[in-house]
Image (tube, rainbow, N blue to C red):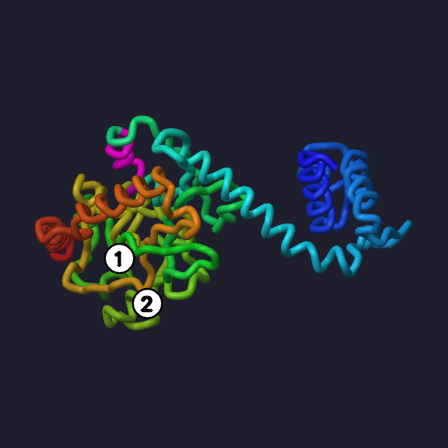
Amino acid sequence: MKSPIFLNALKAFEAAARHGSFSAASAELNVTPAAVGQLVRGLEDWLGAPLFLRAASGRARLVPTDAARRALPDIQAGFDKLALGMEILRDASHSGVLTVTISPAFAAKWLLPRIERFQAAWPDTDVRLETSHKSVDFLAQGIDIGVRYGAGAWPGLTAEKLLDEEMYPVCSPDYARRHPLAAPRDLAGAALIHDLSLEGVDGATSWDDWLRQAGVPSGARKRGLRINNAAAVLQAASEGQGVALARGVMAQDDLAAGRLVRLFPTIACRSALAYFIVYRAECAASPRLQAFRDWLLAEAARFSKPASSTKATKAAKLAKPARQR
C-alpha cells in the first residue's frame, strides 16, 4: 500500500472508530461515507483481518475489534505527532499566522488596546484572535497560545502567570455624585451590577464575597442588572446603570480615562484567580509563540495597579456631596 493511501486509510479508520460511524467520519474528513468505507476495507485487506464488527441494526453498528481498540491509542498518538511536526515546519520563522484564544471581555478591555505594539514589533506575524468564553482544544482547533482566567491548572497546557487580579466596586462619576456611597453599607440602596461570566467558577469573587469582607450584613439588598460578559458589566457601570464589582485588570483603562471611579479604595480584595498565558509544552520553541509570550509579559510588567490614589481620592470627593444631600 502506498504511503499516502496508507495514511488516509489510517485516518479514515481512526475517525470511524472514534465516531462509531462511517457517516460521521465522512463529515469530519470532508469525503463521502462510501470513500471512508472503501479506505477502511482497503486497510483491512492489507492487514488480512477485520477492524470492525458490523451490525445490520441497533445503535452500535460499527464496533472496533479488540485488536483495533488496542491499536487506536498509538495510532491517535501518531497523528498528534504528525500534526506537531507540521506545526514545527510551519513555525520555523516569525512570519505567518499566530492563533490566540482569549475571552471576548479580555480581548476588548485589555488586549486590543495594546495589540498594535506587538504588530509594530513583529509586522510579519498575523495575529488571529479566537474569542470564546469556553476552554478550547488547542490541538484540534489549531491554537498556538492563549490567555485564560483561573487558578492556573489546565490539562495538557503549560500555564505562566500573566496578571494578578483585585476586585473592587466601581461606578460612573455621575452615579457617584447622585448616590450616597460614602461607606460600603450604602451599597444596600444601590443598583448592583452582577458579572455572571464567572458564576459557578471555583475561587471567583462575587458581590456576596466582597460585601462580607467589607462587613456589610448578608441581608443587604443586592438588586440590579445581571450580565454574562465582564466588558458589558463595566460598560453598564460607565453608563450610570449602577455599581459593578470590577475585575481590576479589565477596569484600569476605564479608570484612567475617567469613565469609572473606584469606591472604597481602602478595602483590598485580591482574587484567588489570575490571568495566565497558556500553550502546549511541545510548541514552546515556536519563534512566533515565544515572541508573543515575551510581549505579553512585557505588557503585564508595564501594567500599573488597577486604581491610583488620585482616582481613589476623586471617587471619595464625588461620593461625599451625595451623602450630604
Q: Position of residue 163 (x, y in %)?
A: 27, 53
Q: Position of residue 61 (x, y in %)?
A: 84, 51
Question: Residue 130, relative to residue 187: is it above or below?
Answer: above
Residue corresponding to mark 1: 164
Residue 113 sits inside the magenta stretch = yes
- The mark nearer the N terminus, 2 or 1, is 1
Q: How many marks?
A: 2
Labels 2, 1: front one: 1
Q: Quadrant of the C terminus?
A: bottom left
Give the amino acid at mark 1.
Asp
Q: Quadrant of the N terminus?
A: top right
The stretch of residues the image draws in magenta is 110-119
Residue corresponding to mark 2: 209
Residue in the foreground of this view, choosing between 235 and 60? 60
The residue located at (69%, 51%) in the rendering is 18
Question: Residue 48, relative to residue 205: is it above or below?
Answer: above
The residue located at (81%, 54%) in the rendering is 60
Q: Position of residue 310 (x, y in %)?
A: 8, 49
Relative placement, left or right, of 54 versus 25 is right
Give the amino acid at mark 2.
Asp
The residue located at (29%, 62%) in the rendering is 271
Relative placement, left or right, of 304 versus 106 is left
